[in-house]
């Protein structure tokens, strides 16, 4: 140990070894460094696969699509009379059918932004970042809205189950679902179906083959002459589209049918699996597919037994290293079931494209564009401590808002077949999720 | 090099073997709960006791019960039918048309108690062992077993959650 007087003069050289206290001078406790958050961008699936229908002002509250229907083919045989006898005749009557729909809307908002953080804080782009994120959420909302409508409106539901490769069930259809799971394909309906099958199967190639046969039965034609982008970079021509999540797609390379009948030179190890199945189905990957998780703490008959977990959640432990991070929701990752969709051509569903707002309300933003507004009220207290609302006359606050008008109509509800399957993952001896 | 590869295979096999668990139990006649969690079952062995031959039925359930109760729900049904309509035609005559087709409508399925669909059924003679059978059963709830009489059961499984 050495001791010295600091500062001092005329000390004996070499009498001591003195070091400046490392905590003597000022320093920054942190040096903030900005980093752009990286995340997988949302991509639209449904709006590119479906048709489009315009909706303009002054068209009322409800639309009705009226379609001509061909007469059914009744003949298995044809035995006309000889010319010497009087001819028999066929009566051919065509009909019309109609489908109703209504344009919908949804709003998105940020919390209020006070000017102070933007002035004093290190991170400068909070508002732009939020704007970009709301844009992303609006795009996803539109896609999820279409998927929800299609799932609940679909005439049939396929649940692959032992011992066969697919069980096609008559399903509740023709009405929209709701968040409570009490409308459309209700939670109690889905619970009953899943409870009734001992071993719900994966999305196997056999199941997909059966689903395509079903589409043929229903005389739902494949896409034709479409140049929609797809996973194999070829036109979606003379094919059905299969919309599925990536982990169902990843399992195809272990599918027993594929492994048994694949070409000897098909390299599934390093080249992966390509998107074309049987020359009739083109796979289209969906980000965050629809999943079901069972709440096994509930009675299997209860509505709450079926849950629809959110794909993501937030880390809330303030002492965790990733506090505040958006992370995958474990319930979603572990969900037992998932839904894929076989989509036929001919635009069985059409997304509504809502026209501009009425002329006198032309400033009303309702096309989903995110705008920044200071047209907000600000709370303040009067002399009695009551909250009163003042205008934002000092322009201290901003808010991001978006108003989306949207909608979808199913003109051929047999044209999309949802397949509810058990999730399996893993390369060797795949295990359920 | 070959030795290295062999060592790696042995280590991997050991890791895989560790992931498997063996569960053995003596079953009384009736339904018992064997696994209260989702599992991938790879092997089943059934043993009969001196009580006599036994049949065991496996169910995917997390309670010692072979039944469950569904809530009432609505589904869709359709049937072939004829619909007759009568109109007055342009000549003023009554005209009866019969349209032949199917009629699709909603159907309510009442709440009722059902037996869980069985995953598998195995039998064993008195005082004899049946199995082990290689299976690939993946449960979402657990494993409940109904035995017709006293029996032993050995299950090799991997817990999924």
Image: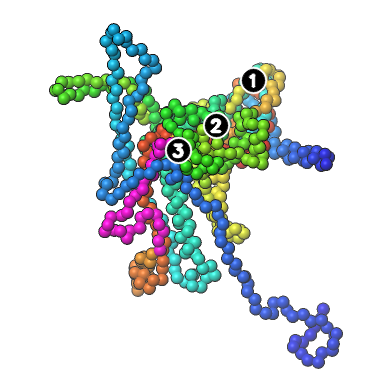
Q: Nearer the viewer, residue A74 or B38?
A: A74
Magenta span contains residue A354: yes
Q: Read off the chain for label 1.
A: B
Q: Which residue is mark 2?
A: A278
Task: Tell me: B78 left or right of A119.
Answer: left
Q: Residue furthest front?
A: A83
Q: Read off the chain for label 2.
A: A
Q: Read off the chain for label 3.
A: A
Q: Closer to the camera: disc 1 or disc 2?
A: 2
> Quarter holding the C terminus of chain B?
top right
Are dots 3 and 1 on a single chain? no
Q: Closer to the camera: disc 3 or disc 1?
A: 3
N-terminal of the two: label 3 or label 2? 3
Q: Quadrant of residue B120?
A: top right
Q: Is residue A29 visible?
A: yes
Q: Closer to the camera: disc 3 or disc 2?
A: 3
> Quarter holding the N terminus of chain B?
top right
The magenta stretch spans which residues? A345-372
Q: CA distance from mark 3 to mark 2?
A: 18 Å
Q: Nearer the viewer, residue A6 or A421?
A: A421
Q: Residue furthest top?
A: A84
Element type at mark 2: loop
Q: Is residue A193 visible?
A: no
Q: Which residue is mark 3?
A: A225
Q: Which residue is mark 1?
A: B123
What main secondary structure does the magenta stretch of the protein show? loop
Dots 3 and 1: beta carbons under 8 Å? no
**Residue A220 place in picture, x, y as percent:** 42, 31
Q: Residue at x 80, y 38 (%)?
A: B6
């Amino acid at each position: 140990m050495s001791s010295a007087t600091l500062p001092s003069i005329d000390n004996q050289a070499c009498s001591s070894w003195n070091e400046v206290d490392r905590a003597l001078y000022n320093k920054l406790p942190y040096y903030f460094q900005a980093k752009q958050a990286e995340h997988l961008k949302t991509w639209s699936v449904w709006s590119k696969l479906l048709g489009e229908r315009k909706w303009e002002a002054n068209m009322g509250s409800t639309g009705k699509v009226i379609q001509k229907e061909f007469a059914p083919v009744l003949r298995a045989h044809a035995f006309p009379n000889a010319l010497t006898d009087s001819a028999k005749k066929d009566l051919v009557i065509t009909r019309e059918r109609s489908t109703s729909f209504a344009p919908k809307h949804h709003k998105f908002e940020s919390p209020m932004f006070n000017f102070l953080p933007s002035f004093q804080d290190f991170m400068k782009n909070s508002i732009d970042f939020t704007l970009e994120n709301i844009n992303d959420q609006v795009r996803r909302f539109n896609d999820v809205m279409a998927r929800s409508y299609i799932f609940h409106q679909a005439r049939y539901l396929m649940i692959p189950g032992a011992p066969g490769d697919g069980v096609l069930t008559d399903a509740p259809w023709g009405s929209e679902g709701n968040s409570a799971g009490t409308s459309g394909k209700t939670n109690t309906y889905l619970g009953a179906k899943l409870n009734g099958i001992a071993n719900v199967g994966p999305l196997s190639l056999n199941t997909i083959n059966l689903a395509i046969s079903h589409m043929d039965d229903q005389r739902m034609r494949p896409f034709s002459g479409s140049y929609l982008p797809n996973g194999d970079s070829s036109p979606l021509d003379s094919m059905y589209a299969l919309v599925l999540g990536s982990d169902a797609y990843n399992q195809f390379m272990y599918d027993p049918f594929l492994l048994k009948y694949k070409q000897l030179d098909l390299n599934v190890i390093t080249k992966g699996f390509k998107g074309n199945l049987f020359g009739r189905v083109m796979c289209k990957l969906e980000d965050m597919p629809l999943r079901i998780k069972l709440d096994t703490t509930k009675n299997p008959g209860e509505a709450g037994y079926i849950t629809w977990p959110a794909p993501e959640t937030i880390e809330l432990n303030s002492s965790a290293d990733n506090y505040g991070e958006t992370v995958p929701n474990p319930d979603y990752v572990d969900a037992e079931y998932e839904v894929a969709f076989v989509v036929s051509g001919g635009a069985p569903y059409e997304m509504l494209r809502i026209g501009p707002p009425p002329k006198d309300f032309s400033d009303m933003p309702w096309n989903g564009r995110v705008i920044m507004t200071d047209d907000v009220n600000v709370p303040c207290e009067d002399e009695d401590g009551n909250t009163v609302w003042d205008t934002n006359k000092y322009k201290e606050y901003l808010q991001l808002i978006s108003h989306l008008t949207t909608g979808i109509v199913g003109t051929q509800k047999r044209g999309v077949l949802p397949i509810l399957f058990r999730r399996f993952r893993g390369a060797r001896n795949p295990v359920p999720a | 090099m070959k030795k290295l590869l062999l060592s790696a295979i042995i280590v991997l096999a050991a890791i895989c073997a560790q992931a498997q668990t063996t569960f053995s139990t003596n079953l009384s006649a009736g339904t018992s709960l064997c696994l209260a969690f989702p599992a991938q079952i790879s092997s089943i062995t059934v043993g009969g006791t001196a009580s006599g031959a036994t049949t065991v039925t496996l169910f995917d359930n997390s309670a010692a019960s072979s039944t469950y109760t569904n809530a009432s729900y609505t589904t869709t049904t359709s049937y072939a039918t004829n619909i007759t309509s009568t109109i007055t035609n342009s000549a003023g005559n009554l005209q009866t048309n019969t349209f032949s087709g199917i009629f699709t409508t909603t159907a309510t399925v009442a709440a009722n108690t059902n037996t869980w669909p069985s995953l598998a059924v195995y039998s064993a003679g008195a005082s004899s062992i049946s199995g082990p059978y290689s299976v690939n059963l993946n449960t979402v709830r657990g494993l409940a077993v109904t035995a017709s009489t006293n029996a032993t059961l050995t299950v090799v499984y991997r817990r999924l959650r």
